[in-house]
Image (cartoon, rainbow, N blue to C red):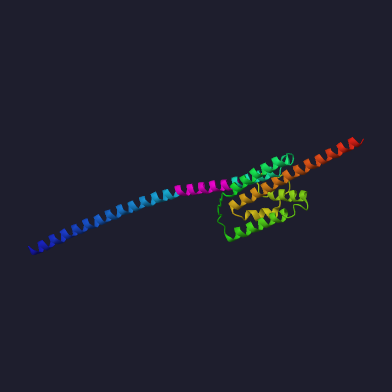
Amino acid sequence: MAQAKISAKASEGAQQQQQSSGGQLRGRFYRSTSMADRSSRLLENLDQLELRVEAFRDAASAMEQEKETLLEMIHNIQNSQDMRHISEGEREELNLTANRLMGRTLTVEVSVETIRNAQQQESLLHATKMIDEIVNKLLDDLEDAKIRLMSLYGACTSDVPAGPIDQKFQSVVIGCAIEDQKKIKRRLETLLRNLENSEKSITLLEHQKSSVRQSCNSKQD
């Protein structure tokens, strides 16, 4: 009889242990599933935020470009031929307006920092130095500077270049961060536009001088 009771107790204990163990396993299983769900939701939220962060940076970069464009347009108006062919009073009034617009534009500070490694930083400095060297010699030889800038620009574009490409500059630009490559290309585009406007102004001025000389000669005759 005693042996039977002991066996019954042992059997009952084994059953309780199995039930307890099964409950723990089920509990652990449910906890794991819950953790996986939470992790999945968090990852999905971060993925959505990453898209918003990139869109935010793109919008800020667009604002940077818009600021550069506005300043360039105001500067071009102030130095246009039309400004030279109006009365002194009108020119003074228009310059006041242009300076006011430029001042208001400069009050907007937009800065998008580019994350670079050491090599990309060095490549950016090298590319900037190569452009600056040409810019510093613009007044010495305008035509040569334009040709050299076009060769640099050709190294930055995927389109078929109109002239030769500066292979050395191209290898330097490739080592820059993607955002820096875009900024370098924009800077070269701006420089070439300004050169083109300068050439037009010089051509127009020379044409006017020639017209004046012909008028004077005809009067003398």
Residue 202: x, y in percent? 77, 44
Q: Looking at the image, can residue 117 be seen?
A: yes
Residue segment shown in magenta: 48-65
- Relative to 19, is 137 on the left or the right? right
7 horizontally vs 32: left or right: left
Q: Residue at x 58, y 51 (%)?
A: 179
Residue 160 seen from this side:
no
How many discs appear?
A: 0
Residue 159, image x, y percentages:
66, 44
Location of the C terminus (image quadrant): top right
Q: Quadrant of residue 100?
A: top right
> Is 131 located above or below residue 83 in the figure?
below
Report the residue at 80% width, 39% height from top. 208
Residue furthest to the left in view is 1
Report x, y in % for residue 133.
Answer: 71, 56
Q: Residue furthest front?
A: 89
Name the main secondary structure of what is drawn in magenta. helix
For the residue pair 195 and 29, the one nearer the viewer reads as: 195
* Residue 99 in magenta stretch: no
**Quadrant occupied by the N terminus:** bottom left
Does the magenta portion include 55? yes
Q: Nearer the viewer, residue 3 or 126?
A: 126
Quadrant of the image occupied by residue 80:
top right
Nearest to the observer: residue 68 or residue 79: 79
Instruction: Give the residue furthest to the bottom.
Output: 2
At 72% across and 54% down in the image, what residue appears? 134
* Image coordinates for residue 103, horizontal then vertical, percent: 61, 48
From the viewer's perspective, is 114 left or right of 211?
Answer: left
